[in-house]
Amino acid sequence: MHKKVLLSLIVIVFFWLSLPATSLVDYKSEPANLESNKHCFDCHSNNIYQYENENTGKVERKAMNPNFVYNPDDFYKGVHRHFACTDCHSPDYETFPHQAELRLEEMYSCLDCHGGDPTYAQFQFELIDDEFHKSVHSTKHDESFNCWMCHNPHSYTNMTRSDFKISEIVSYHNKTCVNCHDNNIHFQRISDSLKPSLEVIHSFLPNYKLHFSAVRCIECHTSQEDTMWVAHNILEKEFAVKKCVECHSSNTMLISSLYKYQNIEARRNRGTLNAVLINEAYVIGANRNIYVNYASIALFFLTLLGIAIHVFFRIKMK
Amino acid sequence: MTQKLYLYPIWLRIWHAINALMFLTLILTGISLQFSNPEAPLIRFDFAVTYHNIAGVILSINYLIFLLGNLTTGNGKFYKIRLKGLVDQIIKQIKYYMFGTFKGEHTPFPVNKERKFNPLQKVTYIGTMYMLIPIMIITGLALLFPEFIIENVLNLSGIYLTALLHGIVGFLLLMFLAIHVYFSTMGSTPTSNFKSMIDGYHESH
């Protein structure tokens, strides 16, 4: 009887561990406002738009402001995929030509929708806001530096909580940074100087290109909060991580941030058993196999012991 | 009475000296990297990485010289093995090391112009020089250029597996080094083999 109970428990635990978790966003069904949004995307997904000028009766062909061009594919892959454009923008945008004063409409911030809502508690929006206000992005700039400077709500994807590969997560997050820090036009939106060369200021890194493709910028440039999914307290450059061992050893901040959460998320998404087997995260020096370490130390000392015994008999039998 | 036999030509001695130096550098820096600890690093991590990489590249080039030397000089013949009777010969040699040497017996396979290594040495050196060192060089080069490593092998990180293999073989080579250095003290005198590394002459019992 006990055996049967034990067996059933094992089967239940095994099944539970293998279960993937569900997402807050429904990515399977068709976007809820595909048709109504098409009206906006007809112009705002292209570099050129055209309309019939009612005064002249001619069809006018104009260049779209590149800041107002959005890719529908990216939008419908993002977390806001079921939104109508007018959920966030004024319904007055439905008329064309758009009224000039609409440009002055106040945009929602993340907290306007997600703050204080228990549905989104796991994303820690309030903590993110607190951390952001400590960061150089907030302390060195005025209020115009908001969430949208880095995160585009039209394409935002929740990378760390999904089944993406680490390389994809790193690439996505780093694009957010280099979008301004490696682009003079964007950089000068908030600075009077030209952007520094990323290559030059990171030349101290061995194989800096590999670091850029394997590690997120925020891994070295933020104050790591162990309870946070994505650190938002960007530090002044003097406080950035420069010591190799801070990442390349066990119990490091790198392991405690991206890779740790990637593994936790992998377990949520793929089930524990699969995630333990599928582990692409590797940092030289940090992912050592403890059993190999113990075995090698034991074998080495056994070798020395063997030599010591041999030496003893050589001396004794001389 | 001891006999002197010129067994180690100058190129081989230079090769061996470079190999020994690089081997020690790789072992020390490798241990420092493997057990890297921010609180008490054996060698500063970035220095250890640089020295390890440089020593690895020099050792790899040196290995090519070893292969070339073995192909073009007579040194290659010492690594040729005859499987017939090999197990018995190895057992005989092990027995000598475990018992015979303490009783003052003569080595069962004395060194001469045709036989530089005893059967146990030969098997160990073949395993080390033609299996372990190439694995170390290939995995080491792969870790220097990780973009060439297959990303995912049987659902495990290719880099992780490469590094794991590099580390395991590194430790096997560390054990080889400990035994190799110790056995060097078992010449006609404890220091005679070390003298041979400099003058090229082997002293027989």
Image: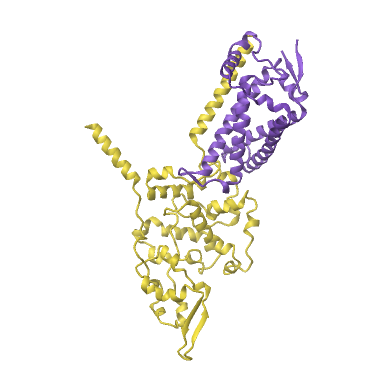
Q: Colour of chain A?
A: yellow
Q: Nearer the viewer, residue B126 or A98?
A: B126
Q: Residue at x 60, y 28 (%)?
A: B127
Using residue B186 as the reference point, say whether residue A20 is left or right of it.
Answer: left
Using residue B178 as the reference point, say whether residue A2 is left or right of it.
Answer: left
Residue B200 on image: x %, y %: 76, 23
Residue B43 sits in which quadrant? top right
Whether A240 is drawn above or below A36: the answer is above
Using residue A290 as the reference point, say whether residue B178 is left or right of it.
Answer: right
Residue A270 on image: x %, y %: 38, 48
Q: Nearer the viewer, residue A159 or B165?
A: B165
Which quadrant does the N terminus of chain B fall into?
A: top right
Whether A299 is drawn above or below B68: the answer is above
Residue A297 sits in which quadrant? top right
Residue B63 on image: x %, y %: 68, 35
Q: Colour of chain B?
A: purple
Which quadrant does the C terminus of chain B fall into?
A: top right
Q: Residue at x 56, y 20 (%)?
A: A305
Residue B73 on image: x %, y %: 73, 29
Whether A54 is drawn above or below A182: the answer is below
Q: Residue furthest left?
A: A1
Q: Nearer the viewer, residue A148 or B144?
A: B144
Q: Is residue B35 among the parts visible in the rendering?
A: no
Q: Is residue A46 among the parts visible in the rendering?
A: yes
Using residue A63 as the reference point, say whether residue B80 is left or right of it.
Answer: right
Q: Nearer the viewer, residue A165 or B142?
A: B142
Q: Residue at x 59, y 32 (%)?
A: B132
